[in-house]
Image: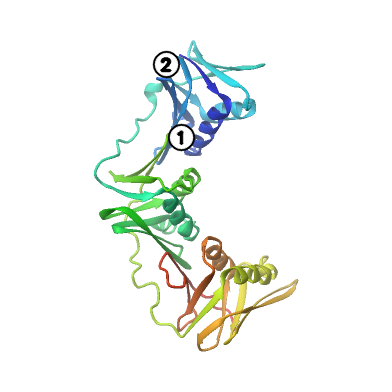
Amino acid sequence: MKIIVNSLDLNDAVAKVSKALSSKDVAPVLECIKITADNDKLTLFATDKDLAIEKTIEANVIVGGTFLVPGCIFGDYIRNIADSNSDIALEMVDERLVISSSGSECNISTLDVDDYPESENIGGEHYFAVQEINLKEIINNVIFSVATDDSRPMLKGVYFEAKGYTLSAVATDGYRFAMSKKPLEEEAERISATVPSRSLNELSKLLGDSENVLKIYIENNFLLVELPNTKLSTRLLNGQYIKYDNIVPRDFVSTLLVNKETFEKSLNIAAIMSRSEKNNLVVFDIEEYSMSISSTSQYGSAREDVPISLRGKDIRCAYNSKYINDCLKVINAESIKMEFAQHNSCVITINDSDEVLYFILPVKQIV
């Protein structure tokens, strides 16, 4: 086998598929990248059996073939020799991969391709169709709310449901709840799946801002996303996601409207004093025309006043500022609506829109 390929193209492909390499102490083949050369295409593939990423690039394939190379060593070497004006030659010699470029050469032992696990056969009638930019946004709108501990494994993923012409995504860690909705390009029968947050983080990095329509296949406990020249598949989380229909309150004692940019800036300033504290506590004192945001720590105190429009009674409440700030970072709107239930739990939405909904529990220690 002998190939000549652009060094930057190869470096980009290796960097992308390496995200699926196993980080655990497993079989050596799962630490490898499988590379196939055929018809002037070079296809790189990596998997840890839960997540798999495939990337195809153009190459001058002089002699085709397939080989298995240790991913970390191969990736480190390619990254260090990649240059905008250079090509890299890859050639198999006596079961070793010889890599050569201008002034550089090394050889790496390869492993037996027959020992590598076969990829899952996914792709059929069970799919939903969504614009690439909408898939990226719906992931980013909720993924920060997934749980990070192992006590409730299903909460370490995002629950997706495609039904009719709507795609919904839900995530919660028990302290906050996030929901987002985006339109589908084709009518879908009800399809649901809980996707691990790690896989969604990597998928989000691969997605662009185009309006290209992607088909997302869900079969045999796997999800597959096909992008131009790139595929990502992931094993789904097994089990029943929590019943969340009654989590968000429907009755509120107060509702306010506030400019999103002003609120976000003031929250970040007011929260500076509480960043060293465990719960990032900020206190809201809400009156008819103004919301005061304050924090206190051993270093001092800070306060910011924000103009608002309030309907309902005055409110004094406290929240983890990080939970609110995470929501504000992804909301794309001029103003937001905050609704407060009886015990100061808060629902944040965009006024007159169901694109996002965030439900945040208050911090209890407040006078």
Image quarter where the C terminus lies is bottom right
Give the residue drawn at x 67%, y 72%. Answer: 270
Residue 232 occupies which quadrant of the picture? top left
Of residue 261 and residue 366, the one placed in the foreground of this image is 261
The residue identified by callout 2 is 64
Of residue 150 and residue 222, the one placed in the foreground of this image is 222
Q: Earlier in the sequence, mark 2 or mark 1?
A: 1
Badge nearest the viewer, 2 or 1? 2
Which residue type carries mark 2? Gly
Helix, strand or loop at label 2? It is loop
The residue identified by callout 1 is 26
Whether tag 2 and tag 1 are in contact, CB under 8 A, the answer is: no
Which percent across, then down, holds residue 217? 31, 45
Which percent across, then down, holds residue 275? 66, 66
Of residue 284 and residue 227, the one placed in the foreground of this image is 227
Which percent across, then down, holds residue 187? 26, 54
Give the residue drawn at x 26%, y 54%. Answer: 188
Mark 1 burial class by Cα count in 10 Å: few <14, some 14-19, many 20+: few
Helix, strand or loop at label 1? It is loop
Asked whether, in this view, residue 290 is left or right of residue 172, the answer is right
Vertical order, 195 against 63 (above or below): below
| Res 146 seen here | no
Vertical order, 238 against 181 (above or below): above
| Res 323 seen here | yes
Which percent across, then down, holds residue 197? 45, 51
Residue 53 occupies which quadrant of the picture? top left
Which residue type carries mark 1? Val
Q: How is the image coloured?
A: rainbow
Give the residue drawn at x 48%, y 55%. Answer: 140
Image quarter where the N terminus lies is top left
Vertical order, 309 against 74 (above or below): below
